[in-house]
Structure formats: C-alpha cells, structure tokens
Image (tube, coloured by chain):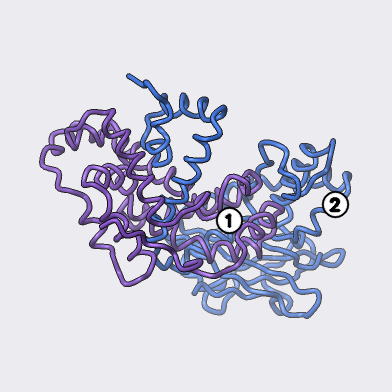
Chain colours: A blue, B purple
C-alpha cells in the first residue's frame, strides 16, 4: 500500500477505518508525533459528537446485567505511571498492589473501594486461595449472565446495620439461576446459608452458600420456580427451610 | 453556508465524568453506576447505529460497558474527555463485530457496491429536535458530499477506507484526505477544542 505521508491517516485512524497492518504502523508513528496525537484526540472528540447524536434510552435490563457482572470482572492495572494528581500513586509497589486490589475486587463482591484499599497482605493471600476456589462457580455465573434472556433482580436483607445485598440471575433459555451475595453477615458457627427455588410457595433445596459473599449457580433446574429464597440452616443444610428466609427474590 | 455553529456551553450538565472514572478505577461500583447513567445511552445508540440488530447491539453495548469497568485505570485524563474515550471503545467493538461478520459477505457487498445510495440520508432520518443532533446535522451539511459520505460510511457503517474508496469509486489517497479534512471541518464547526 502506498502510504506516503502518515500524517494524513489521522482521520481514517480516528474513525477506525484502517486495516490492522496500517493501524499498527500508524500507532508506531503516533507514538513519536505529538501533533498527530493531538489531532487524533480532537477527531475522537468530534466523532463522539456523532456518536452522542445517536443516543437512545437503554432498557433497564442492560444496567441490571452490567451491574450484576461487575463483581465477576477483574479490573486491569494501568499501562504506565499515572500522571501527577491523577489516580493513586504508590511508588515502588504499584504493580503488585494493583494486582492484589484487582484480585480482591474480583472476589469481594461489591465490597467498597475503601475496604479493599486497606486490606493487608495476608488477607490478599487468603483472598487468592479463596478466589481460586470460587473461580469455577464464578465462571458458571458469568456464563449464565451471557444468556440472551438473562435477567437479574437485587434485594437487601432486612436487619438494619448487618444487612447485605443479594442478586438473583436467571435465564429461562438456560433453565438455570444463580445467586450473588454481597456483604451478608457471616452465618453463626454451625450454620450456613442455604439457597432455595421458590416453586410458588414450596421451597426446593438448591445448594449451600457457606459464607456471606460469593456467587454460585443454584443446583437443579429452574423449571417453574417463581423466585429464589435464602435461609440460615444448620451446617450441611436442610431438606425444608427451618427458619424464615433472610432474603426472597422474586423473578420479576 | 460558512456559518459556524458554536456550542452554547456544555450540552448536558452532569457529574464530573473524569472524577467518576478515577473512582471506578478503584473498584467503586456506585461511581460506575453514575458513569453508566451518563454514557450508556450514547454507547447503545452508537453501537446500534453501526450494527442495526437490536439484540446484537445490546450484547456489544454490555461488552463495551464492562470494558470501561475493566480498563478504567488506563484512561488518561490528559489525552481527552471521558465520553470520547468511552465511545472510541464502543465504536472499536462495534466495528470489530461488523468486520468479523463481514468477511464472508465481502463478495456480495462488492457486487452491490455499485448501486449504493448516498449515506447522508441515514443521518438525516435520525435527526430529531435535540440540540446536539441539530448541530451535528448542520455541521454535516457543511461538508462536501465526498467528505460526508466517506465519514458516514466509515463511522456509521464500519467500513475501512479501502472499502469506502471501492464503494464510492474514488482513489484510496483521496478518501484518506477527505476523511481528514472532513473531520477538521466538522471539528471546527462543532467547536470541539483540544
């Protein structure tokens, strides 16, 4: 291809109209051409106007799906040192710190940023081990979230200060449901959270959730269930609920 | 026809997106929720403009928004505003989706290329009373036909510039140049600063 003056490619580059080879070549040029970078940034801002002119109101389900998926996504570290005054700066420790932050963010569903930031090293190491154990469950839940008809609903446990948040994900095409727990108080010794399918008032056992955080696919088929229930049961679980549910999430 | 349309202040006063994105990079889901409210509409709209298919568009929009969450730490404030950064991701993903589906259909497209009708109508049909759309429309009108069609085919259809050249029957070098000078004229007309 006859690329004589790479400067003239700024427009096609900003509009993503270069083929992969030329794109790579232009990016190499861009790295050493501040005026090109400036022009590309201006073109990106210009094209963004063309983009926002197309704005439409997204369906509620899109936000629900996106928000429910956040805890399953590992956030990346920055490529390079952030500019002064932008973002956190932890000289000498940046990369490992971010790795741990990201890992903790992946595991500690919906945990606050402040809470993560003060985690000590040994806690991060524990988190690493637990993350590995949870990975299989999270992969299943993430997979369920990609179902075209996946829907979500979120509820808070009553009980004031000790309240947590639970999110149900379900897909009729997959015939599956999942539960994501965030900040539920750890169950007392000798007890566990148990998940149930609500078959129009009859609770069907659907697996255990030993801690107050985590994501898991419910055992058994969705069938005609109208919701999910969560109770506290003796360790090992029960065939029928023995206490009032701490959380009921209807499939609506 | 040389009148310049200036923005009268920010089109949509809202939260400080740079600050929100900085918090998102630290794993702040509340900040992401607010950022989502500001960018999801443009993201979905742009992706759907390129892909057309509603189900596929929602799927790609979801990927885009999760990429914003995943890569928030890589945003560099000194390189520009948040919305262009987000919409660049959105456009890139939409275009990638078009091109992966397109490879097989290339021969058909070439055959149909000769009967392609000018794409500006596609912009016009979307125009509503909103200020931003009106500005874009007025500024698009100030472009030459070749500038306008080159940009529309590339940005809203996801064509590469060789494809644009082929469809419009114009030499490659000309399309390259028209995209650039068209964008310069649009930039100045829309009052987009550095």
Residue at the image point whose x is 20% and y is 56% from the top: B121
Residue occupied by mark 1: A69
Q: Could you tell me which chain the residue with mark 2 belongs to?
A: A
**Where B133 sits versus B165, above or below?**
below
Out of B51 and B122, give the one closest to the viewer: B122
Residue ranking furthest to the left:
B115
Quadrant hosting residue A249 = bottom right
Q: Taking B97 as reference, is B64 above or below it?
A: below
Is any part of residue B38 visible from this angle?
Answer: yes
Q: Report whether A128 appears left or right of A245.
A: right
- The crowd level at tag 1 (other Cα within 10 Å; few <14, some 14-19, many 20+) is many
Mark 2: which secondary structure? loop
Q: In this view of the protein, which residue sits in the foreground, A159 or B177? A: B177
Q: Which residue is labeled 2 in the image?
A: A119
Q: Is residue A111 left or right of residue B48?
A: right
Q: Quadrant of the N terminus of chain A?
A: top left
- Closest to the observer, A49 or A140: A49
Which chain does the residue under circle 1 lie in? A
Q: Position of residue A107 (x, y in %)?
A: 72, 51
- The disc placed on residue B182 is none
For numbered disc 1, what is the local secondary structure?
helix
Q: Is residue A158 above or below residue A32?
A: below
* For marks 1 and 2 on the same chain, the one whose residue lies earlier in the sequence: 1
> A35 or B67: nearer the eye?
A35
- In percent of width and height, residue B116 lies at 14, 43
């Amino acid at each position: 291809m006859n690329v004589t003056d790479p400067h003239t490619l700024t427009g096609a580059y900003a509009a993503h109209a270069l083929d992969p080879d030329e794109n790579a070549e232009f990016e190499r040029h861009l790295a050493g051409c501040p005026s090109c970078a400036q022009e590309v940034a201006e073109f990106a801002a210009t094209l963004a106007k063309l983009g926002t002119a197309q704005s439409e109101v997204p369906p509620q389900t899109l936000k629900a799906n996106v928000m429910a998926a956040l805890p399953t996504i590992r956030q990346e570290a920055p490529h390079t040192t952030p500019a002064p005054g932008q973002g956190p700066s932890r000289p000498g420790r940046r990369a490992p710190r971010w790795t741990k932050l990201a890992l903790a963010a992946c595991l500690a569903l919906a945990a606050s940023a402040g809470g993560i930031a003060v985690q000590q090293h040994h806690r991060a190491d524990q988190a690493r081990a637990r993350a590995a154990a949870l990975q299989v469950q999270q992969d299943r839940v993430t997979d369920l979230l990609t179902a075209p008809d996946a829907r979500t609903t979120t509820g808070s446990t009553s009980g004031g200060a000790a309240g947590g948040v639970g999110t149900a994900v379900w897909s009729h095409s997959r015939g599956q449901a999942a539960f994501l727990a965030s900040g539920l108080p750890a169950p007392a010794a000798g007890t566990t959270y148990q998940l149930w399918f609500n078959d129009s008032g009859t609770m069907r056992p659907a697996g255990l959730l030993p801690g107050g955080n985590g994501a898991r696919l419910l055992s058994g088929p969705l069938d005609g269930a109208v919701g999910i229930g969560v109770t506290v049961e003796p360790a090992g679980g029960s065939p029928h609920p023995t206490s009032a549910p701490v959380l009921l999430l209807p499939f609506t | 026809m040389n009148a310049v349309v200036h923005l009268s202040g920010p089109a949509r006063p809202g939260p400080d997106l740079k600050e929100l994105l900085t918090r998102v990079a630290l794993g702040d889901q509340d900040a992401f929720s607010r950022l989502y409210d500001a960018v999801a509409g443009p993201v979905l709209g742009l992706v759907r403009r390129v892909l057309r298919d509603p189900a596929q568009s929602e799927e790609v929009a979801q990927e885009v928004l999760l990429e914003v969450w995943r890569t928030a730490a890589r945003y560099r404030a000194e390189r520009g505003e948040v919305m262009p950064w987000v919409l660049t991701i959105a456009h890139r993903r939409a275009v990638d989706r078009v091109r992966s589906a397109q490879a097989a259909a290339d021969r058909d497209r070439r055959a149909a290329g000769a009967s392609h009708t000018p794409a500006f109508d596609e912009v016009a049909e979307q125009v509503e009373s909103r200020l931003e759309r009106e500005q874009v429309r007025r500024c698009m009108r100030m472009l030459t036909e070749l500038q306008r069609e080159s940009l529309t085919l590339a940005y809203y259809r996801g064509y590469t510039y060789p494809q644009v050249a082929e469809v419009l029957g114009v030499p490659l070098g000309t399309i390259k140049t028209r995209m650039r000078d068209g964008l310069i004229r649009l930039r100045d007309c829309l009052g987009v600063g550095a």
